[in-house]
Image (cartoon, rainbow, N blue to C red):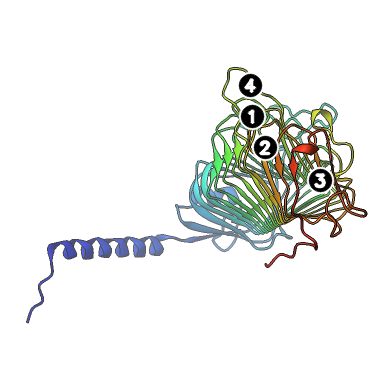
Amino acid sequence: MRKHIKPANIRLLVALSAALVTGLCQTATASTICVNQGGTNGCKATIEAAVTAASPGDTIQVAHGTYKEDVVIDKSLSLIGENDQNTIIDATGKANGVTITNAHDVVVSGFTVENADAAGVWITGSSFVTISANLVRNNDKALDPVTPSCPPLKGTPFERGEAEDCGEGVFLSAVDHSILANNTVTGNAGGILITDDTGPTHDNLITSNSVVRNTFLDCGITLPSHSGAGVFHNTISGNDSSYNGGPGVGIFAPGPGSKAYANVVINNHLRGNGLPGVTMHNHAAPVGPPPPIFNDNVIVGNDISANSQDFEDAATSGPTGINIYSVGTMTGTIISQNVISQEALDVVIKVPAAGVPVVQLHLNNFTDKQVGLQNAGTAQVDATQNWWGCSGGPGANGCGTISGSGASGVVFSPWLTQPFQSQQ
């Protein structure tokens, strides 16, 4: 007996069949293009020639060698180097090593990218980009470190608030839903810059990178809002950001209308940086213009040690683990489960009162037995359930202390009577 199929089900089957055929066609038509320095065996001699020849969805495989190029990618493709130690994009005299603009579903993996005037890897106006397993080193070559300033380079929209570099190791602006993973970023003026110069930058994952020994001028991983489009919902996870000139991780909403909010800094190793391990600044309280949005950032589970003090208007009196400074009001900051050591001041907060606690500070281990928390502003801080170095709580003999003009605005009881142990 024939089984009757309803018209709605027929339409569904047709749609599924069409989707399957489309997927098969895409798989069948996607191709692999090879590159080697001699252009032999049917391969291209340059990476840029392969990119030009590629169709969306293609894979470009690059043999070992040195390629003197600024590789510009404006379509969906995978660019795979043989090995990040011997497959080199040498951008000497060029703006960037790899430039990704107005593209989606791009993968770049397995290269050394070095010697660019601006950024090693420059990404703007793009989504679903993966940059993994690369060595990005010795870029920012056009920087004048004396001024410091970066002369305009043809065709490159330089970030508005970063005179200390020309683009850093990796630059993101107007980028969303992208991943930077397992890269080594070293010897640049700054490490990784995540900003909003050309549009909002959000929902990106920066994970398991080694961002170390970038120069004295700039930060390891920086999230500054320059245009007001916003830097938000980004996750900085499991990175080693150490021995950089600025902070290990910096979140900045510097002036009226800037937006750096709801970012997560989790499980990073932040040691020996030239500013506090995590540094957050807002420098201008607006009169008339829209206020900055500097709320709901989360700092959790980080290992922070042996960093430097902050300077200028956000100055701290000694080496500092976390410094939060804002002229304008901010709320919703969470600092939790961090281990802070070898600092004179573990956490410094200088923020105006907002009617509610502006910072939730819980389950941290303040191991130095010096200043666990300095509340230098007028804001309320909920600092219950922290380990202050001994079972007696803040101010007890051998414990860390609470200091600052706003010390009376800190709630610290109950406290932990033994160090917090993460369940992870």
Image coordinates for residue 71, horizontal then vertical, percent: 61, 46
Q: Quadrant of residue 403?
A: top right
Tell me which amino acid carries mark 1: Lys
Q: Which is more N-terminal, label 2 or label 4?
A: 2
Label 4: element kind = loop
User: Which numbered dot is residue 244?
Assistant: 3
Q: Report whether residue 362 is seen.
A: yes
Which mark's residue is nearer the viewer, 4 or 1?
A: 4
Image coordinates for residue 236, horizontal then vertical, percent: 66, 51
Image coordinates for residue 395, horizontal then vertical, percent: 87, 48
Q: Which is more N-terminal, label 1 or label 3?
A: 1
User: Which numbered dot is residue 154?
Assistant: 1
Which mark's residue is nearer the viewer, 3 or 4?
A: 4
Q: Whole-Å distance between the Cαs marked 2 and 3? A: 23 Å
Looking at the image, do the residues carrying marks 1 and 2 touch, with CB atoms under 8 Å apart? yes
Which quarter of the rendered picture does the C terminus lie within? bottom right
Q: Which is more N-terminal, label 1 or label 4?
A: 1
Q: Quadrant of residue 96?
A: top right
Q: How many marks?
A: 4
Residue topped by disc 4? 286
Residue topped by disc 2? 95
Q: Which residue is more in the foreground, 205 or 360?
A: 360
Q: Which residue is more in the foreground, 200 or 395?
A: 395
